[in-house]
Amino acid sequence: MDIDQIGRWLLNGKTIIGAEITSPGFFLQLGLILIGAGLAFVVWTAIRSRYRTSSMAMGWPNAARRLVRILIDSAPIAIFAVLMLLTRFVMLSMTWPSHSYLLPVAAKLAFAWLIIRLATSVIRNALAVRVISIAAWCVAALSILGQLQPTMEALDSVAIVIGGLRLTPLLIIKATVLLAAALWASNFVSHFLENSVARSTDLTPSMQVLLIKLIRVVLMVVTVALVLGAVGIDLSALAFFSGAVGVGIGLGLQKIVANFISGIILLVDKSVKPGDLVTVGDSFGRINAMKTRYISVAAGDGREFLIPNEDMVTQKVVNWTYTDKNTLVKVKFSTNYDADPRVVCRLAVDVATKTPRVTDMKPPGCLLTEFGDYGMQFALTFWISDPDAGMDNVRSDVMLALWEAFKREGIRVPYPVRDIRIRGGALPVEPITDAPG
C-alpha cells in the first residue's frame, strides 16, 4: 500500500462515516447510547450509596481485594453493556434491526474494556496499567469495527530502510509490545532466581551478587534476541547499530563500562564483599550493597557513600575485615611525670581487659612511647571482634574507664601551664571615682 492508496482509503472512510452520520438511525442510536451510559452511572451510584464498598472483602488476600475493587469500579461499564444488549434485543423484536447496529458495537467495546481491566489487575504499576489498557482497547476496537487488518497494512506500508533493516511503524509497535511483555516476564523470572540464590547458604555473599548480576545480564540479552527474532528482525542487520554503540562506548560510555567491568572484577577476586568494613579515601563504613555501577558504603550515621567500582579497583582501599574481623584499636593518652609509668601501663591494660567487646584472644598492651614537653605519652592497644558495631564507641568506653581509674589512683593528666612575665615598672593605675548622680 503506497501513499496514494492510503489517501484513497482515508477518503473512502470519510465518505462512509459521512453517510452514516447523516442517516436518521445514527442519532437515535447515539441518544440510546448516551441514555444507557447515564442510567448505568445512576445505578452504580445508588449501589455505592447503599453498600459500603470499602468494607467489602475485608480479611481477604491482597490479590482478591484488588480484584473486588476493580470489579466495583468497573461496574458501570458492565451495566452499560447489559443495557445496550437489552436495548438491542428490544429493537430487534420491534423489527428495527437497521436502527440498532451501533448498540452491539458499543456493548462489545464495553465488554472488551472490562476484560482488559480484569486482565491487567495483576500489574501493580498504575502507569503501566493505563498504557496497556488503552493500547489493548484500541486494538480490540479496531478488531470489532473490522479495521484491524487495513490499519496494520497501512502501518506496514510506510518504511525506512537503514542498511539491511526495514523499519516500519508496525514493526516498531510489535517490537515495543513484545519487548515490554518479555522484559516483564524476564524480570519475574529474574526475581525468582535471585531469591533462590540469596537463600542459598552454600554461596558466599560475593558469589551471590556475581550470580545475580550474571542472571540479569543473560536474561536481558536472551530476551532482546528472542524478541528481535520474533518480529522478523535479522540480527545480522544490526551490524550498523552495533558499530554505532561501539563508537558511543569508546567516546562517552567508557566510565560506565569501566565501572561495570570493575564490579565484575571485585566480585571475582573477592577483595571486598557485602558486610566488610572498608576505608576508601575519607569514606569509612560497612559495605551495604554491591551494584553494577557503584558500591554502597553505610557510614553508620545515616549516610551512605556511593563509591564507583572503578575507584575500588584503582585506589587504595583499607579492608578492616578482609581475612578476619579482629581489628586493632589504639588509644593514646598521657600522664604527668609524677606517675610511675609501669603502674600506668598495668592500670591501662587492666582497664582495657575489663571493658566489654574487648576480645581476650589477643591481650591488650600498653607502651610508653615518648617523654613529651608536658608529660609521658602512652599508647594502649586492644583487639575487638565486631568492628561493624563501631570502633569510636569502644574507644570512648576505654577512655572513660581509664579516666575513672586515674582519678581513683591519683594520677593526673598533664595540661600546659604558661607563666606570663611583664618586664618594666608597674603601669600606673588611675583611681576609679563614682560618677556624679
Image (spheres, rainbow, N blue to C red):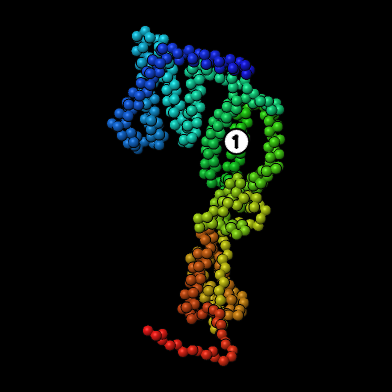
Is residue 340 visible in this depiction of the protein?
no
Name the residue: 61% across, 75% down: 369
Q: To which quarter of the image does residue 238 belong? A: top right
- What amino acid type is highlighted by mark number 1? Met
Q: Nearer the viewer, residue 54 or 353?
A: 54
Residue 248: percent from left, percent from top: 68, 40
Q: Position of residue 57 (x, y in %)?
A: 34, 34
For label 1, the residue is 220
Give how far across and how far down residue 95 sits, in percent: 37, 7
Image quarter (top left, top right, bottom left or bottom right) of the C terminus: bottom left
Residue found farthest to the bottom: 425
Among the 4 quarters of the image, the one containing residue 372: bottom right
Residue 53 position (above or below residue 394): above
As drawn, which residue projects farthest toward the front?
436
Work out whether residue 305 can be spotted: yes
Instruction: Judge by depth and name the residue closer to the eye, 325 or 233.
Output: 233
Q: Is residue 51 left or right of residue 18?
A: left
Residue appearing at x 56%, y 46% in the figure: 202
Q: Is residue 82 above or below residue 50?
A: above
The outermost residue toward the top is: 95
Q: Secondary structure at mark 1?
A: helix
Which one is in front, 367 or 304?
304
Q: Is residue 164 above or below residue 319?
A: above
Along the viewing direction, whichever of 212 and 360 lies nearer the viewer:
212
Category of crowding for the residue at label 1, using alpha-carbon neighbours closer than 10 angstroms: few (below 14), some (14–19), many (at least 20): some
Quarter occupied by the N terminus:
top right
Q: Position of residue 386 (x, y in %)?
A: 53, 60
Residue at 55% of width from left, 29% of height from top? 177
